[in-house]
Image (spheres, coloured by chain):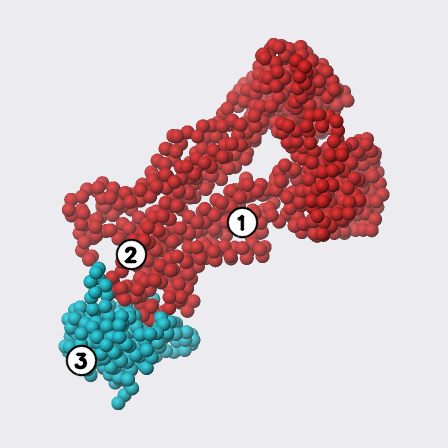
Chain colours: A cyan, B red
Amino acid sequence: MKNKLLSLNIASKTVNLGSHKIALLDKIDLQVHEGEFISLMGPSGSGKSTLLNCIGMLDRFTDGGYTFLGEPVHSMKEKNRSRLYKEYIGFVFQAYHLIDELTVYENIETPLLYKNIKSSERKAMVADMLDRFNIVGKKDLFPMQLSGGQQQLVGIARALIGKPKLILADEPTGNLNSKQSDEIMELFAQLNEEGVTIIQATHSESNAAYGSRIINLLDGKIV
Amino acid sequence: MIRNYFKIAWRNLMKHKVFSLINIIGLTIGISASVVIGLMIFYDTTFDTFHKDSDRIYRVVSDFSDPEESFSNSGVTLALEDAIKEQSNLEIVSGFYIERPSKVENKALNSEFKWPNFVIYTDENYFKIFDYNFLAGDTDHVLTRPNTVILTEQRAANYFPNTAASDIIGKTLVYNDSLQITVTGIVENFKQRTDFVFEEFISKPTLLQTRLRAQVLEKNWNSTNSDSQLFVKINANADLQTIQNTLDDLAKEHTDEDSKKYGEERKFSLQPLADIHFNEAYGIYDWSKGQASTSLLLNLALVALFLLLLGCINFINLNTAQASQRAKEIGIRKTLGSSRQQLIGQFMGETFLLVLISALLSVLLSKWLITVFSDFVPEGLDFELITSPIIIVAFILLLLIVTFLSGFYPALVLSKFNTVSVLKNHLAIGQKKAKLRKFLTVFQFTIAQVFIIATLLVGKQINFLLTKDMGFKTDAIVSVYSPRNERSIDKKERYARALSKIPELKTISIGGVAPASFNVSSSGLSYTNKNKEIHTDIQFLYGDTHYLDLFELQLLAGRNIRNDTIQELVINETSRKLLGFDNPNEAIGQIVQVNNETVPIVGVMSDFYQRSLRSSIKPMALRGDWYRPDYSQFQTLHIAFHNESSEGLKQTLSKIEDAYRSVYTDTEEYRVEFLDENIQKFYNRERKISKLLNWATGLSILISCLGLLGLVIYTTNRRVKEIGVRKVLGASLMEINTLLCKEFLILVAMAFVIAAPIAWYGITRWLQDFAYKTSVSFWVFVVSGAAMILFALLVISFKTLQAANANPVEALRSD
């Protein structure tokens, strides 16, 4: 049995909308082990993105327990949570979310800046990543000059540069055509082989099939 | 990291060129104003700070007061020095006497120097208070013997060109044709900023061989001359109050009977060395240099502060307005691991880059501004001053403060964005931030509006001052001054006769100063009217029989004085009333006492303004040149032209000069003044203020309107869709334009409501200095309010019309 990466213990998230209380996530129980490739499925509004954001510590559960690598995230201070996700988590978004003002190279480099890695080391790491994704020739281009698939490639490269244990991907192929989509999914599968844990949210059955486990969500509950 | 920040800052700058330009212009203006004004303040406050123990050096000055007025004199009676010499609180007491010799000759070189300036008679104590660096000469026995002089390096170079300092020692100069004086020392001129501009130091005992012998021997307690200066250096632990008490006791002890009778008081005060450069009541030694004015510096500092604030406000407004455009980047950075502090750091870095660009531009601009504002900038201020360490530190500090003021709030706002909502495009711009922007915009326009109103009203007052009838003829009159050492009347009369042959001239009068001038000569006058003794100060005009006629002064009763030297007075209406005569005729033939002489009043003339309209009309009388030939007050020839236009003026003026040269053959000196120009000079200060206000107004309107433009561009861009929908629904161009302009015009109108009372209060206070003033008219407020709204409307419409004109299909398609 592999190490347990994270576990959710009847974790919920509710928001107040006017006088109503709405449960976005309702008593989620989930264990994720290192090396898993999980696909979250469910219709729009079922809580996939919210769950990813909460796991990624961009958002917080309002109730219940969340343990990441044995550390209790739910009772942690902002600063420590930030340290934790900086170290172990990478994000990939549907809309890529590259910084428009930065070149491909600089986009990939940015997470390293926030980890205070030395310049020479950064250079080597980014060069490796560019090489691996075959985008050396594009390193000085701005995101606007790339196709959607290429942008997502950069997005994944950026997520990987910090050598995270967990990659959270929110509909990573939602804006791509099927060929690009397949390429990206192949890449995820390959990364998973190399030991990276992946949780992806997706609508697509075929994409979900790349995962080792499928979790279905409906109205904030696991079904 | 830093490099990454600057890179992205630079790219953002280039991406939003218009906004960046607006920000840079605003900040550049603010910083430039601060640099120039900062330099001025630094320059003026560093005068005479280099002397050893400068905080312990004081000048003793005299303040006089009587029931009517008070005035000050930078000098003290010659008697005071001896009286305080032994005071234990005073470490050093040094008096000196300023006296220009009429001539200095270096017989060996056969060279002659007329009226050298900055010559004082003093003793070794002077050199103990002020540390001069001796280049040559005996430093142990400084100015102890009579007939010795110490020269500064510069003066020595004049008198003894190309001679080494040590070779000059022992050489002799001849002063005023008879005094043989030996040079015993050469000192270095002060290298730092100083008001102590003296070049020649003659030993004090030498005074006994000059025209001042009698005064020096007499040491009259009741005679005060500004040439007689007294400095003290107090002990390190001396009590100022004790010294003041001693001075008060001395003043009291030596009050004469007359002063007691008329309630006149004299007070000796200690003026700190640092105050000398600022206090106009006592003046400095080089009149041509001009003093610093605390109030002017304060006003300038306020202007700089306002301009700087306006620039910062633009920055805050534009950056918070643009915040949503940066939101995505912020969200991404947060997911990539950036902390809020790091984001704030990044934004502050961007602000600093912008401020830095502005600062570089400011340095260039300031150099130019110093020449534009030469009226305000002290003459000796060199742009090189900017390289002094204090200024550089202050400049860097200023940049940091500006960065903080402009950048901190936007950085807080930007870094606060919630990551999840940003990335989901659920970004709501809070109503609160819009409110802050509105508040800041109102603040900006309030400042601009106050400046506009003030400019108009100050302009109105100046116009009032310059066009107000002075009560005598001011046009087409020139005054030619006789050479300074010309004491006899003969040559003046010869000159007058020569002038009378020039056909273009109407009237010629020999006399003292013109009816309105900076010079005032006055003395006490007493008169007993119905058993009541009236005592007053009366100012004198000196003139011959043509004087009244030339200046077209009106005689209300009696007659003109009969000749140049007869002891008669023609008083003005103000004196007539003061002396208690019910009508002009009643005054004729009455006898008054002037300087212990009895003089009849022979005429009454109408009142006129004797100085600027700041001061009210004082008692005055026209008199002749009574003390001739011992002493003459007639130093000027006033000339009135037939032709009032400037046609042929040049030829006439050269004829006047030719006549002068034909009479005064042995002098180079020639001084001519136009009366109307002199009167304008009364209002130099007002015109300076007016110029300053014009600039402040222009710049504040510019910055505020640029800021407004930025906001309008931003809001209009955000409302493109709304505009499109409205157009599709049938709104006209005007309707849309009105819709877009309305919210901004309300802000400008609010600013007017706030600004009007502030401006009214300020200008009313300023006008209090004037005895005669223009009305603070209602229309000025209306006009300036309208002007501001017009400016704003122009700026707003520039963008809104463009938006309203756009094809709605374009706007709606993009979403």
- Quadrant of image for the N terminus of chain B: bottom left
Disc sitting over residue A214 in the figure: 3
Q: Are marks 2 and 1 in contact (CB under 8 Å)?
A: no
Query: In the drawing, does residue B461 fall left or right of residue B733?
Result: right
Disc sitting over residue B38 in the figure: 1
Disc sitting over residue A121 in the figure: none
Residue drawn at x 26%, y 75% is: A64
Query: In the drawing, does residue A160 fall left or right of residue B158?
Result: left
Mark count: 3
Determine the secondary structure under disc 3: strand
Q: Position of residue B673 (x, y in %)?
A: 61, 27
- Specify whether residue B116 is in view: no
Instruction: Quickly name the residue at label 2.
Output: B429
Establish if B710 lies above or below B696: below
Whether discs 3 and 1 lie on one chain: the answer is: no
The front one of A77 and B523 is: A77
Query: In the drawing, does residue B214 fall left or right of residue A208?
Result: right
Neighbours of disc 3 within 10 Å: few (<14), some (14-19), many (20+) = some
The front one of A144 and B633 is: B633
Mark found first going from the N terminus, 2 or 1: 1
| Location of residue B731 (image quadrant) | top left
Amino acid identity at mark 3: Ile
Q: Nearer the viewer, mark 2 or mark 1?
A: 2
Mark 1, chain letter?
B
Q: Position of residue A148 (x, y in %)?
A: 23, 69
Mark 3, chain letter?
A
Establish if B64 lies above or below B646: below
Determine the secondary structure under disc 2: loop
Residue drawn at x 37%, y 66% is: B340
Query: In the drawing, does residue B798 fall left or right of residue A171?
Result: right
Judged from this view, the residue extending furthest toward the right is B145
Determine the secondary structure under disc 1: helix
